[in-house]
Amino acid sequence: MKRRELMGYAGLGLATALISTFGSEQKADAQSSGSLSVQWLGHTCFLFTGGGARVLVNPFRTLGCTAKYRSPKVVSDVVLISSQLLDEGAVEGLPGNPKLIYESGIYKYKGLDFQGSAIAHDRRGGKQFGMNTSWSWKQAGVNIVHLGVPAAPLAFEQTVVFSRLGRPDIAFIPVGGGNKGYTAQEAKQAVEAIKPKLVIPTHYRTQAADDKCDISSVDEFLGLMQGMKVQRSNGDTISINPRSLADTTAIQVMSYKF
C-alpha cells in the first residue's frame, strides 16, 4: 500500500479532502514512551492524547444508539473515521483544522504511522453496509488497535497487520451485535485472535440509546469472558502507561457521565 498523508480538514468535509503522497520519514516524539490519555466520548468515539498529538476516532451524530450522548466536538490534530453511515463518521463542525483519514491505507502525520485495514461492515461481505476501516497505530509508546465496527470475522492477514508494532497493548472491540457489528461471541473470537493486553469494549447499548437502537449491552460479552479480569473506570478518561500493563489480557469498561 502507498504511504499517504491526508491534507483535508473538517471545514471542507470528507468529499473534498485531498490526498497526496508523503515522502519524508522524519521521527517525532508521538510514538515514544510516556503515558497515553484515553477519553471515551460515547459509542466507538475516543480521544487519544499523548506524545504531542491528539487523535480523535469516530465522532458521531447523536441519534439512535447515540441519541443522548453529547456531540463529540473536541479539538484534535487527526481524525480517524471507520465508516460514514448515518450516525457514524460525523466531522461537521469539528473545531480547529484536524486532518481527516477515512480510507484504508498507510498514513503518516505528526510522527504517527496509521494503518487502516478494510473489514466488512456486515455479514455479507460489505454488500449491505459497505466496508469498515479498522485502525492501528502507536502513540506515546502504546500500541493501539481500534476495530471500528466490523461484522465480518477477522482474517489472518488483518491480525498480522494489527500486530506489526508488536502485541497490541490496547484494543477497542465492538461487542453489542446488531446488523453492523460483532456479537458478544464474535467479539470474544476477536480478542482471542488479536490477544491484546487490554480490551476496551465499544458499540454497546447504554442509557444514551433511544427505542430504535438494535444493539445489546456490554453484559453478555462480559459474561462470556469468565476468568478474565474486568476493571471499571470511575470516569470517562484513563491513563495508560505501556510498562504497567500486565501480560494477561484484562478488560476495561469505561464510564460516561450523562
Image (cartoon, grey):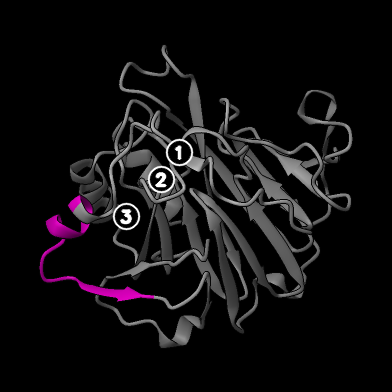
Instruction: Name the residue type under label 1.
Output: Cys
**Tag 3 residue:** 194
Q: Is residue 231 magenta?
A: yes
Residue 180 lies in what quarter of the image? top left
Is 74 or 229 nearer to us in this picture? 74
Q: Which residues are magenta?
A: 220-232
Residue 158 lies in what quarter of the image? top left
Chain-order first, disc 3 or disc 1: 1
The residue located at (59%, 82%) in the rendering is: 35
Cβ–Cβ below 8 Å for labels 1 and 2?
yes
Disc 1 secondary structure class: helix
The residue located at (64%, 32%) in the rendering is: 103
Chain-order first, disc 1 or disc 2: 1
**Tag 1 residue:** 65
Q: Position of residue 65 (x, y in %)?
A: 45, 38
Q: Position of residue 134 (x, y in %)?
A: 50, 42
**Tag 2 residue:** 203
Q: Is residue 181 magenta?
A: no
The residue located at (50%, 66%) in the rendering is: 143
Instruction: Name the residue type under label 3.
Output: Ile
Instruction: Name the residue type under label 2.
Output: His
Cβ–Cβ below 8 Å for labels 3 and 1?
no
